[in-house]
Image (cartoon, helix red, strand yellow):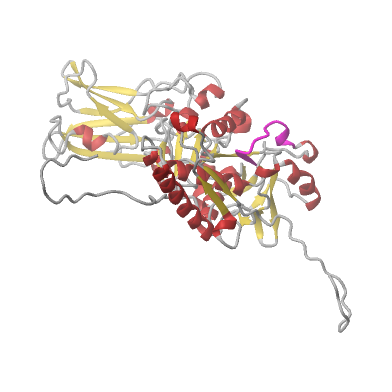
Amino acid sequence: MPEYLSPGVYVEEIEIGAKPIAGASTSTAGFLGEAERGPTTPRLVTSWLDYQRVFGGYFGADKYLPYSVQGFFDNGGQRCYISRVVKTGAATASLKLKKGAADALTIEVVGEGSWGKRVAVKISKGTFGGFKLSVFYWQEAPPVLFDPETDTTTKPRPAVAELFDNLSINESSSDYFVKKVNGISNLIKISKKTGDSGEIPDDLSITTLQNGDDGTGSLVLSDYVRSDTNEPGKRKGLTGLAEVDEISIIYSPNAQGVAGLVGALITHCETLKDRFAVIDASQGSANVAGLDPRSQNDTKYAAFYYPWIKVIDPVAGVRRLAPPGGHMVGIYARSDAERGVHKAPANESVRGAVDLEFQITKGEQDILNPRGVNCIRAFSSGIRVWGARTLSSDTLWKYINIRRLFIFLEKSIDEGTQWVVFEPNNEKLWARVKQTITEFLTRVWRDGALMGAKPEEAFFVKADRTTMTQDDIDNGRLICLIGVAPVKPAEFVIFRIAQYAGGSSLSE
């Protein structure tokens, strides 16, 4: 209670009634895979061009991440986090800038790998003071290193060139090198390390960074999971994606080629309970009778897609195979934006797909659909997603849109009711909680996500002495019971047609 120590009029602000619940994001994706270059902590990108600026482009016959990310944006995706995967022992290329005989500053590339040895820098006097830093990156190392700013002959030009002028070593200056370079450059960061003098470095002719390497051996599960990186803000791989709360869909285009990775993606989603995994079939899976992913991974937190698709390789201009998952994640995002998360992401055109690895017949899909295999098929209307099932054998959770709708509801309610924690646990609070959730679910029902002609038929919310015992209350537990009736997709559309003798009576 507030204190009133002297006579007078007191005007006080209080809160009554519900607090609005904002719907959680459902279409922010997390991609896990190999990129040409770039940081190895998760980075948000909002377009295909944005991805190319930070992570480069197409770079290898079995490196499918760029095709998947482009497929995501081509199909309606808007936001995704990229977690670039490297070997656990990979090293970061760096270079010491000198002032006389002493180290002045240190330059490092933004992520591990041998790509950093194809980064070169040049130091010169700034136009209006300080120093100028020129940075170049070649996709392939030139036979002879040259200065692209002065050598205009027809030599391999750098894929990326960055210029930072008038850099200052004064921390209070608006031109302080940390402010103007770090976080702005897509290639390097510059800093004063222990032992560096922090002085303006001497002029430096174009010089490549040193000691970056990819590590030894092929990538394995631990390289994708990266449980060794547990410092906040420095987590990598799947561990890094776990701390990005906005993510609601997880995908890795090389998951089938890494032992244990499919299971790790599913466990990631089942543990966090706020995201859903998209899984591809293996390339070349021609044995339809043997394709039964549910027998290995029975889960309501993942969907499986088959077969691979053919896309146009923008480098060679020819058709090539690519896993379909990135395109599927984009379709999820498009369907969410156009219709809502309650709409099954199926009977949707796969933009960018020009053909399929295998043509699936209705008879083959009759075998695959009950096993949780979502087929991608070619029709006269184009290549379409023709399945909407999870990998769960539990009939309550067999549809993708039902699982994702509940993820949306649970996450939205969780985030929208944090204000309840530590409030006095009494009838007034219970009423406010009930009103808050009721108003949110009413809005969800009006959007068409729930069954029923009126809200009372679509959901119920209870928070009272019937949901909590005195022991619950004494131990600080507020228990709210919520039931919703989700809409299910019309998976089998049946028109029963019979001959009818006009004029005769017909009884049902």
181 sits left or right of 32 in the view: left
Asked if residue 53 lies left or right of residue 133, the reply is right
User: Quadrant of residue 403 in the image?
Assistant: top right
Nearer-the-camera pick, 162 or 5? 5
| Residue 292 in view | yes
At 36% across and 24% down in the image, what residue appears? 93
Which residue is painted at 81% across and 50% down in the image?
363
Total numbered labels placed on residues in the image = 0
In the image, residue 300 lies in the stretch drawn in magenta: yes
Q: Judge by depth and name the residue closer to the eye, 59 or 411.
A: 411
Depth check, front residue: 242 or 158 = 242
The percent coordinates of residue 131 (x first, y second) are: 16, 33
As drawn, 91 above or below 255? above
Q: Is residue 156 visible?
A: no
- Residue 126 lies in quadrant: top left
The part of the chain drawn in magenta is 292-304
Q: Position of residue 139 (x, y in %)?
A: 43, 35
Q: In this rendering, is residue 29 above or below 113?
A: below
Residue furthest front as drawn:
7
